[in-house]
Image (cartoon, grey):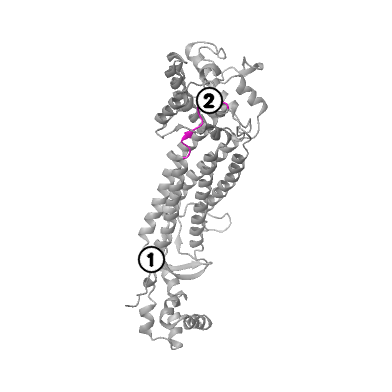
Amino acid sequence: MAHRTETDGLGPIDVPQDALWGAQTQRSLRYFSIGRELIPHEMIEAYAILKRACATANAASGRLTVERADLITRICDEIMSGMHDRMFPLHVWMTGSGTQFNMNVNEVIANRASQITGHPLGSKNPLHPNDHVNMAQSTNDTFPSAMYIASALATHRRLLPALQRIRNAIAQKAAKWAHIVKVGRTHLQDAVPITLGQEWEGYVGMLDENIQRLEQARDGLLPLALGGTALGTGVNTDPQFATRACAEIARLTSLNFTSGENKFALHGAHDALVHLSGCLRTLAGSLFKIANDIRLLACGPRAGLGELNLPINEPGSSIMPGKINPTQAEALTMLCLQVMGNDVVVGMGGASGMLDMNAYKPLMIQNIMQSLTLLHDGMENFRSFLIEGTTAHEEHIRQQLDHSLVLVTALSPSIGYDKASQVAHHAVKNGLSPRQSALDLGFMTGEEYDKVADPTLMLQPNITPPKG
């Protein structure tokens, strides 16, 4: 492979001839070729947005010429379009501050400027990666700002819309099944009646709460560390830089990013990311419960509960012909466990900041972006390939309800708890229906039983208070 020689503060190093990155990126590739995980793709766009905004702010103060600012803007637009994705090859497992990725971005912009203007790659003409592209910036404020931008955008653009879609799909099923009365279950044992729609309304409520939590967590990411430079003091910036740059980021993203008031807190800790990760874990827990409920209700089809019919997407066994498995539920629950594990890592990374800077940034953003991606993709698949095609086995549900002993609960207000218990135990011992058991014991007539043991009367408060 042909190479060119580039230099940085440590001297010369060979760089692939056609690469737009420079010396510091190449050193990172040499010394941190660890694992397969690269810095998340979302960080490329976030950094391009940030560098573009910084150039605009520096041009407004007169520190950067309009020509250089326009060149940076043009190249950042190229990066945001995905044009130079191959030029960002760095691994997650590098310096905890992310310095080398910041320099990767700076070097790509500088070398692309040289390429556009007809200067040799590595000449740092007309843009110097540090002096011009990184003007008024430090990795210590740009990397966390890029993490917040990337996370907020992914939450806003992808996760919340996918969550709303699966919520709406479940709500449609809840409305469709509002009339189907079934046996409820607590402790995995038969309980009082509930409608299948009411059961699924519970899932809708869980997801509604997750939407609210995630919207709040997204908004918590909007104050940025940008402008704090090395430690939060703002050294090497002009007084208006942070406000101008963050306003431009807000304009470019249509999210209300602002200059954070306490940049020392934003440098030393990344609690807003930890909070977001916690909300992702909570969503994962909700989805885990929903997916497990659905595959339990669908188990069988003849030797299980068999209340739901899941879509048939693929063969379920290499040896048992005709077997179909709840594979979408399995995939969703597996990724939910991964998200829960990721949250542990993010929490520990967030707690590990020392003194004036957190040095676990790449680790945190890697796990957060994986969680966001897994949850988005998992919800989209679960909705498309399971929820929307699931049907209710109404005949089987009705048969289970007719033979259930839980209807004796409705007898308690009329004959008392003890006699109602006798009805249940007598029915079990003698293989009788609850109705026949009550008649055998002489506690009620058939007319009296039918009047109070109607399962539809047990779906809401059903006791009339005494007058006076």
Span highlighted in magenta in the image: 220-230
Q: Is residue 275 above or below residue 116?
A: below
In percent of the image, x 48 and y 58: which residue is there? 294
Q: Is residue 295 above or below residue 228?
A: below
Say which of 348 and 25 sits in front.
Answer: 348
Residue denoted by label 2: 234
Residue 267, position as x, y percentages in the image: 56, 32
| Magenta highlight on residue 225 | yes
Provide the major secondary structure of the magenta segment: loop
Residue type, label 1: Ile
Say which of 136 and 143 sits in front.
Answer: 136
In percent of the image, x 51 and y 19: which residue is there? 133
Residue 82 seen by the camera: no
Residue denoted by label 1: 180
Residue type, label 2: Gly
**Quarter of the image where the C terminus is located:** bottom left
